[in-house]
Amino acid sequence: MESVVLDGRSLTLDKVERIAKHGALVSFDPGAEEHVERAHRVLNDLAAKDIPIYGLNRGVGVNKDRLISADFFEAYNRNLIYSHSSGAQPLADDEQVRAVMAVRLNTLLSGGAGIQPAVVRMYRDFLNKGVHPVLPLRGSVGAADITLLSHIGLAMIGAGDVRYGGEVMSAEKALMQAGLQKLTLGPKDALSIVSSNALSAGTGALVLQDCRKLLATADAVFALSLEAFQGSTDPLDEAVHRVRPFEGASDSARAVRLLLQGSQLSDADTAERIQDPLSFRSACQVHGAARDALAYAERLMLIQLNSPDDNPCIIEDEGRIVPNSNFDVTTWAVAFEMLGIALSHVSRISCYRSLKLGTPAFTGLARFLTPDPDQAIGFGTIQKTFTSLDAEIRHLSNPVSADFYSLSGDMEDHATNAPLVVRKTGEIIRLLYYILGMEAMHAAQAVDLRQGLRLGEGTQHAYSAIRSAVSFLSADRPLTPDIEAAAALLESGALSRIVLEQQGGTSYAK
Amino acid sequence: MESVVLDGRSLTLDKVERIAKHGALVSFDPGAEEHVERAHRVLNDLAAKDIPIYGLNRGVGVNKDRLISADFFEAYNRNLIYSHSSGAQPLADDEQVRAVMAVRLNTLLSGGAGIQPAVVRMYRDFLNKGVHPVLPLRGSVGAADITLLSHIGLAMIGAGDVRYGGEVMSAEKALMQAGLQKLTLGPKDALSIVSSNALSAGTGALVLQDCRKLLATADAVFALSLEAFQGSTDPLDEAVHRVRPFEGASDSARAVRLLLQGSQLSDADTAERIQDPLSFRSACQVHGAARDALAYAERLMLIQLNSPDDNPCIIEDEGRIVPNSNFDVTTWAVAFEMLGIALSHVSRISCYRSLKLGTPAFTGLARFLTPDPDQAIGFGTIQKTFTSLDAEIRHLSNPVSADFYSLSGDMEDHATNAPLVVRKTGEIIRLLYYILGMEAMHAAQAVDLRQGLRLGEGTQHAYSAIRSAVSFLSADRPLTPDIEAAAALLESGALSRIVLEQQGGTSYAK
Amino acid sequence: MESVVLDGRSLTLDKVERIAKHGALVSFDPGAEEHVERAHRVLNDLAAKDIPIYGLNRGVGVNKDRLISADFFEAYNRNLIYSHSSGAQPLADDEQVRAVMAVRLNTLLSGGAGIQPAVVRMYRDFLNKGVHPVLPLRGSVGAADITLLSHIGLAMIGAGDVRYGGEVMSAEKALMQAGLQKLTLGPKDALSIVSSNALSAGTGALVLQDCRKLLATADAVFALSLEAFQGSTDPLDEAVHRVRPFEGASDSARAVRLLLQGSQLSDADTAERIQDPLSFRSACQVHGAARDALAYAERLMLIQLNSPDDNPCIIEDEGRIVPNSNFDVTTWAVAFEMLGIALSHVSRISCYRSLKLGTPAFTGLARFLTPDPDQAIGFGTIQKTFTSLDAEIRHLSNPVSADFYSLSGDMEDHATNAPLVVRKTGEIIRLLYYILGMEAMHAAQAVDLRQGLRLGEGTQHAYSAIRSAVSFLSADRPLTPDIEAAAALLESGALSRIVLEQQGGTSYAK
Amino acid sequence: MESVVLDGRSLTLDKVERIAKHGALVSFDPGAEEHVERAHRVLNDLAAKDIPIYGLNRGVGVNKDRLISADFFEAYNRNLIYSHSSGAQPLADDEQVRAVMAVRLNTLLSGGAGIQPAVVRMYRDFLNKGVHPVLPLRGSVGAADITLLSHIGLAMIGAGDVRYGGEVMSAEKALMQAGLQKLTLGPKDALSIVSSNALSAGTGALVLQDCRKLLATADAVFALSLEAFQGSTDPLDEAVHRVRPFEGASDSARAVRLLLQGSQLSDADTAERIQDPLSFRSACQVHGAARDALAYAERLMLIQLNSPDDNPCIIEDEGRIVPNSNFDVTTWAVAFEMLGIALSHVSRISCYRSLKLGTPAFTGLARFLTPDPDQAIGFGTIQKTFTSLDAEIRHLSNPVSADFYSLSGDMEDHATNAPLVVRKTGEIIRLLYYILGMEAMHAAQAVDLRQGLRLGEGTQHAYSAIRSAVSFLSADRPLTPDIEAAAALLESGALSRIVLEQQGGTSYAK
């Protein structure tokens, strides 16, 4: 069984994916556990001195003016969990729940919360035993996901529901079956559980990881389209990218060059052709723009995953607790918004390539790639399908992070809508798999119609993968099943694997 | 068993709902059937004269330059249905499928298509026997929903899948079980099946009908909030609306006045109070703006439901067939976009009312309507829940109708994305039920905290309905179940019924 | 000298334009003046009884809890004008200032304000003597334009600046030169001056009037393009619109049919052609969608122009004053947002027609309508010009009305951004004149290249008008001057006049 | 006289600003000039071999299939400049024209174009002699600004207009007065002049430089507001940012800490206060998000400024010319879109701080910071002013880069709208100066009302600067002049200078 060691400072997208999607077990770096204990002692020492501490001996939000007496700690912390459980459907799936718990666990290890060590162990146990709290995805404004993460706290104290062993049951029952004791929350524990962006960050980490595969897929589909189009490889020329060193574009061009190795394209004398439509010529620049945006978002996300977003935050080595706004995620929320916009370009340029592949004036092939102009219509109406999905992506790419209210007695007058920002980015990616899937259907069809092409080694793999899911269109047939099959194939990683392996392999792409 | 007579010119939103949601049977007005037969004869006569007719003896889209010979009619029409079946998930639910078929059936009766009468009867039989083709909702750009309506044609010729008797099965099997013969399509039949906006119009009619209930619900929730707020009724004064006669605002104010009849509010001397926050004072103007927008959209939709959107269109009394663009729905697509924007105002003003109800300076009640300031937190964090849903509505309200491509060999260079426009409007409505549900939770809580209020007759009903789903918050408890229950209650029509009945009753509100 | 009689209930867009743009003098219907005096007496009577009245003996906004004593009336009203003068650049031009004053004057005549009659006369005198207060356009959230209309009040009390006789000078000096006495404001007068939507409504009325001309222009340009394209007139067929009676589309088709009377197009046997690209075929439906949206917006605007938007409002015949929200303009603000979206369709469909006119496969003419394929490039790069302006229109068409804050001690928690909504709609119109101007350049060029076409009577006029501003492109030349000339020609009404006259003439089109 | 040496690889935002705004002269690094000459020889050698080269011996865009014979080179290049001159108003101001020419000059020095060295020298001469071609800003889709940069080419060949010595005159006349010979364009020269993103990049570089000052200003205004609010400095704590090392937030916090040095704030015992509203607490995180976005955009822009964006591109050391898409700027166009979204957060958080400063419950000061609650209204209505500008920023922050068409015979099917993206970002910045100016008015007023505060050294400077432009509001007065004065002060760099100097000084901030 695969396992991931958490230490609060080295979590990666890949590790999140392994825990979330592949069921990897988690364990603690010993130093991290000690860190958690020391921080908890600092908190207790400060509390003992009767220093006012938000969420410990004082209320939260505008209730910061309310004193909370030590007698009331347990009830207060339970009530906080209760009253903060205010979500709306849809529910997170198991993979998302696991990502969220893994992220919150790691940021707790990074120190800062001063949380009771037993709570930390409970996150680990939930992950390792497959206890997955029922977790709504709507209801947080993204200035810490307090209304949603509370549901994990609920389960820890034996309230609410969880999914366990494939069914939904009461947390109480699941804890029992899993051999876990429900927790009694101590001072500030409830705040430490809810006051984090782990929902946005956990789901966001999965989205970024998906996006990496999506962009590898986009390169592979483009490479095959270029073969199908018999287009020029000049714009992929290494020198072109060397003189204008945008990293994403350079990387994309390199990936495509590798895929095309061995192709007859490189033999072609394209001098008279001079140049192709921009949907082909600029593909690597546009895919590269999304790669650049992704790299920026990922860089920020890695800070998020490996630092405390707690307020107040224990500065353990100084024995202090400091009120702050480290739960503010504006910087990476807007990076996700940019990523969505960049992906809308990836979508548009794919749509235009598909349109070109259906146009005889550009390909020399039959209109709409019909196998028989007299007997079959071919890929005509499907143009409406992918462009209508593209319109939806365009719509999703509109920003939403700045649309917030002043809440909680006017104390909470900034927010980011991070969970929604993440969710719409994920929806864009899912729609893009459809769009690229339909491009792949065009590309494979054109390759077949051309007969006898010598494809590159990588594009040959890509072609075969597509043909394993969608057969040659030899006569008109309902295309809806093909559209679903192509999207599913791409989403499975069948094409991204080729690209990512050729890049030297990243384990998640197995 | 309820039944609806269709004649091609008197379909209403209410009738669509009855067929779609209440399983009403459909029958034909005899005149309409004759009309269909005459139009079909006109088409055959013209075809016999060898006049070039789009989709009959010529191809469709850019293929209009292709001749289709009579020998090939059946194969061509089958191929057209096949190649146009190009949708993507999600699938329409049964209610949506029924609405779509009812609308297409009625517009066929309005004349214009020249379709084979047997096809018309098949729509009726599908509705009356509950044969519901599997119909994807994504994939149409809304310049006729040709990629999706084709799936109904598939089922008629015994291909593809349907839902029948509660399960998904092959159309072939379902037709047999239902005692129906699969059709053989004749000249232009396939085009007549696919070239219509019935998917957008059918789902759109349901959305408008829902919206009517939503706006009645909004008035009822506001009326209860006004009681809870002990706000001024001056802005509801009939004279105020008489001098500035915006219809929607006047109707909304009238509805709220009726709900409040008998309330102690009307006894209040509010002179010193002078006026309330705009979220209360302007409620009827804002709800009224949405009512005006809805009335505009509905007026256009009724034309859509009762006129042919066929191209080419038979002008039966003149014995002509005329190429045209009557499938263009820009005018009502943009009306839906306006409606979405108006609903985003309804959402915001509800959110602000909930915030006010939680603010002691405005209500004189405890902060966040807590039942016990020392022991319970109350409705504090839930502010994040409804405002985060409001942000999503704000996002959905962005326009998308003009984001289209030039397709089909550059022949199809305008579109409307009508299915997506309809879908996002429906999502706004669903989210608004949550938001109004949370306002209703606040209002009922404040009413309870005030103790002994004499409510209006209508608001008392509304209060009771809410309390049947969500109990008084006497101590902190997880709010997620309450949030879902309140939304479900409102969506069920529990509150809109009160308003609509008081308006003299519309049958759909039963 | 032209003159307009105002009576508070019959102001039209046309009259606003005449006052604003053509310098028409205004006078009062005698009944209206008496009405103003009676309402003022009602106000005084109520005030004498010491009833709390917002903005009279009580402060405004959250300051409604402040008493204002009679001794302090003058100072209070001056301070209110002062403190409400909070605008930002740009400044309204003279035409806009006049429209704003005319609208506020008329709504004062509709009763409701209870304002001192001398103030009413001052609006008239400002209009008739050309005293135009310096009026910023930015700074109002559109829940009454209080921050901006205050600048008119400033001028009336001899403060701030005005434009008079062509120069900017102090109001004090201008009043003297114009022979006017500065006013002393009495109880509630300041509130009556500022608490109105006259800025949004006045500038909005001008925008709607411009839009009417724009849409007439669009029909004329399309008609000429249809000649240039030698397209089919089938989609204009009266029967097509009779069976699907969307009003805007039917009106647009009628306008185009009239323009084409006498054209050789009607002789053409287009049977084999079957149908044109949608940018031609759907033109009237799309222009019609904008006409429908305009009609809706205009209908609401006429209510706005002819009813009081005062809060509180005198109900003169009942001797009451009622607090209200009649300054809420959500209903027509969202209508303007819809209009902008509809206009973005008009823009896109014009762009696609221009593209088609440059495409040999559709026209049979030389690529990019070059007069000499060997020596000139023609209308190739200009495609970037009109489509880049179209992108700007797409951007402007995004909604903004619901993006407001809770202000004034949380009393003002709804708004509409009406001035910005109006302004962006106006910008869309201005950009559309450019886009249609470039389409007109294409159409005229194609007509010339075809040589010897017999145009319709109306389209011949349109052609001649265009050629008076932009000559045939016989060789490459810088196109920037042509682009500006064509836009200016259209904006001057040269083409709309032809359409509007043929419709029976509306006086404003002279 | 200041001067800047250009070498094609070390241009910075600061240098662009010095050339554009401070009239710095430009000279060439000798190596760069030789590079240009060598590249030109490579081009000539290739042309002599009759290799098909886009824009040299072949047409451009879809006309790439047209041969251009050597006899026709001059005429072709002139026609290309002519036909590409297709812009629309507004016109660039002198500073923008200079930035554009400086950027194009530097990218020509980076090699790639193979342009005639005389053209390169002409850019230098235009800059050094102040010959500024009349340059429209609208009309480019941002896939190279070919429709606009052409106007610089026009002036070089003695056509079109320029601004010279303060007046607009014909280029012919200006060249004569400036002692310059008009150019005769050789092979590919016209393409090299127009095929560049220098308009977007030049105006974009100025916008980024402005943005840097804006963000420094935002920190200074916030620091003063924190004093005015007597808020907690805990969230600025270095440790807080050390544990969560987002660079922008850390830098912003450091800047604010430096400004506050010496303030009495640091003495305060804020323990009981616990924490401030997020508009204060999260200020550095939000300003930091914009700083991060700016850093990302700047990093990409520096690549743009120092690399060839020519197509085809000379690879001089390999003696090749390669067709490519290096004019694609998607990556930095979407970075600008993100920056706009981040700035909308900066705007919102400033608005909320101003609102808080006007709220007695938070400040203990009089409502709306009135100097006299009985006699003056103070900063109440101005809330509408800044929030209405914020709504406009929200609107501007919507994306537009992906809204493009397929143009030029379907060859140009991707674009970025980069000029519009840059322009809207610039408008956001200009509006933000207003918003921050109004916050500064609030902060200074509150400082004055508190009397006797000991400000930090930096905030004292900021306070004094504001008071030099806007005096204490001792009684109500029209605020419009103050609003304009405050915005102008901030835009002048008065406050950013304080921050930037304290950071060690960047020359542009002098």
Image: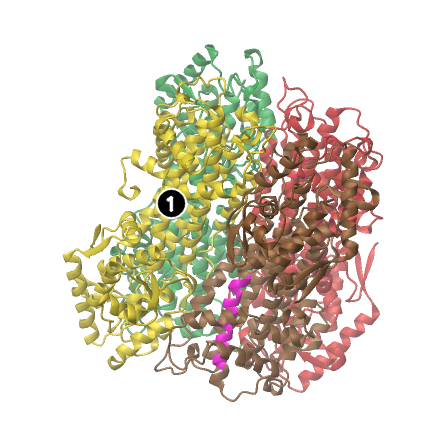
Chain colours: A yellow, B brown, C red, D green
Q: Is residue B172 above or below residue C333?
A: above
Please tell me which residue lies in front, A230 or B67: B67
Residue that badge 1 annotates: A211
Element type where label 1 sits in the image: helix
| Amino acid under disc 1 | Cys
Please tell me which residue lies in front, A289 or A150: A150
The spot of residue B449 in percent (x, y) is: 47, 84
Quadrant position of residue A325: bottom left
Please tell me which residue lies in front, A259 or C221: A259
Chain letter for mark 1, please: A
- The answer to whether any part of residue A493 appears in the image is yes
Image-based side of A231 in relation to D151, left or right: left
Identify the main secondary structure in magenta.
helix
Q: Is residue A262 above or below residue C248?
A: above
As for residue B435 lying within the magenta part, the answer is yes
- Mark 1 neighbour class, 10 Å CA radius: few under 14, some 14 to 19, many 20 or more: many
The spot of residue C117 in percent (x, y) is: 74, 72
Quadrant position of residue A104: bottom left
Residue stretch in magenta: B429-446
The spot of residue B453 in percent (x, y) is: 54, 87
Instruction: Tell me which residue sits at (63%, 17%) in the image.
Output: C374
As for residue A145 lying within the magenta part, the answer is no
Image-based side of C133 in relation to B447, left or right: right
- The answer to whether any part of residue C198 appears in the image is no
Image-based side of B255 in relation to A241, left or right: right
Please tell me which residue lies in front, A241 or A51: A241
* Quadrant position of the C terminus of chain B in the picture: bottom right
The spot of residue C342 in percent (x, y) is: 65, 49
* Quadrant position of the N terminus of chain B in the picture: bottom right
